[in-house]
Image: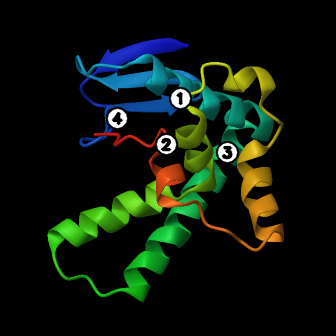
Amino acid sequence: MKIVRNSLIPVPGFTAMNLCGVLFVRGQAAIDDEMLRHERIHTRQMREMGYLPFYIWYVAAWLVRLLWALVSLPLVDKKRRRHRLYGAYANLWLEREAYRHAPDAHYLEHRRHYAWLIEPLSACRSGCKRPSESEKGQGARSRR
């Protein structure tokens, strides 16, 4: 994976952003193996969906989750607003797969096609179980 360090991409508040398989890193921010695996999972998602459909799906899903969060709960203060923005991002199925499996150095070797879609749908077939708090914390790191 090619890594480009600069001061413009990603937007402030994020350490790295994967654009079409190229990892843009803010300044001299540290990137570790787990972050690289997280971004490689996204690259695999992009390749199997197609780059443009990936970004269309990603932005549309984020906007739906963001609107739901903003409509369902009134904005009280900046801290909660920031939390909702992050929650809309972190709960995307594409992100959940990347966060959940980034700690596994061998995940991409045995990853199923469209795993980001299959895992949540199979959970719904078995009663729409949400991940427990321990499962959420597994590999989920702040992008800050």
The answer to which of 74 and 124 lies nearer the viewer is 124
The answer to whether residue 121 is above or below residue 103 is below
Q: Earlier in the sequence, mark 4 or mark 2?
A: 4
Instruction: Answer whether labels 4 and 1 touch (C-beta < 8 Å).
Output: no
Give the Cα distance between marks 3 and 2: 25 Å
Give the Cα distance between marks 3 and 4: 18 Å
Dot 3 crowding, Cα within 10 Å, few <14, some 14–19, many 20+: some
Q: Which label lies toward us, 1 or 3?
A: 1
Q: Secondary structure at mark 3?
A: helix
Q: Secondary structure at mark 2?
A: loop
The answer to which of 74 and 9 lies nearer the viewer is 74
Count of marks placed on residues: 4
Give the Cα distance between marks 1 and 3: 23 Å
Instruction: Answer whether labels 2 and 1 touch (C-beta < 8 Å).
Output: yes
Q: Earlier in the sequence, mark 1 or mark 3?
A: 3
Dot 4 crowding, Cα within 10 Å, few <14, some 14–19, many 20+: some
Q: Position of residue 13 (x, y in %)?
A: 25, 43
Q: Position of residue 79 (x, y in %)?
A: 18, 66
Q: Which label lies toward us, 4 or 1?
A: 1
Q: Quadrant of residue 6?
A: top left
Give the Cα distance between marks 4 and 2: 24 Å
Give the Cα distance between marks 4 and 1: 23 Å
